[in-house]
Amino acid sequence: MGKRRRKGWMCTMNFWLRQLGTLEFWETLLDSFGNLGPIAPIMLAMVESFFPPLPLIAIVALNVAAHGGILGFLYSWAGVALGGSIMFLFWRRVVKCFFWKFASRSPKLEKAQQWVNRFDFLYKQIAVSLNYFALWVGNNKRGVALH
């Protein structure tokens, strides 16, 4: 019985792997994605703000391929902007309250917060804009900051 289940699972996995390698699968996926309207590409780009390991360039490429250059870019931009804003507000409104209740007990965290607060918002924004600095870390840091 166990070998039979494993064989069925492996057949299903092999089927999907073969499907991913065919051009017809990707054409069908792209056509169906293009028919979903603007909500799907915006939501897809928003998810990248919550789960940063997703490749943003692939999401933008999918949106551009499905909706054209201008609309695909605008949908991606709107999704990333909304996702970043939601993450910022989440960290500012929800996490900050609970974080500082526990962090105020630690003198090291208080000292680190004072160090972060010494810098102007512009310097913090430049640090976020660096190529290899994760965007979500910057949103979280600014959301927890006192100023």
Image (cartoon, rainbow, N blue to C red):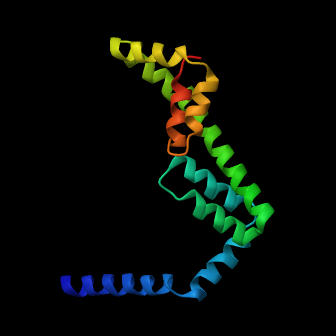
In front of the other: 72 or 6: 72
Residue 67 appearing in the image: yes
Q: Position of residue 23 (x, y in %)?
A: 58, 87
Vertically, is 77 above or below 93?
A: below
> Is residue 109 depicted above or below 139 in this figure?
above
Q: Quadrant of the N terminus?
A: bottom left
**Residue in the image at 71% along x and 58% along y:** 39
Which residue, as the protein is rendered here, is positioned at the far left?
A: 2
Residue drawn at x 64%, y 55% is 43
In terms of depth relative to the viewer, which is nearer, 62 or 3? 62
**Residue 115: percent from left, percent from top:** 46, 15
Rendering coords of residue 99 (x, y %): 43, 23
Which residue does the image show at 49% across and 81% down from the upper left? Answer: 20
Q: Position of residue 40 (x, y in %)?
A: 67, 61
Query: Which quarter of the rendering shows the C terminus?
Result: top right
The quadrant in which residue 123 appears is top right
Please tell me in which quadrant of the rendered image residue 127 appears: top right
| Residue at the spot 53% in from the left edge and 16% down from the top edge | 117
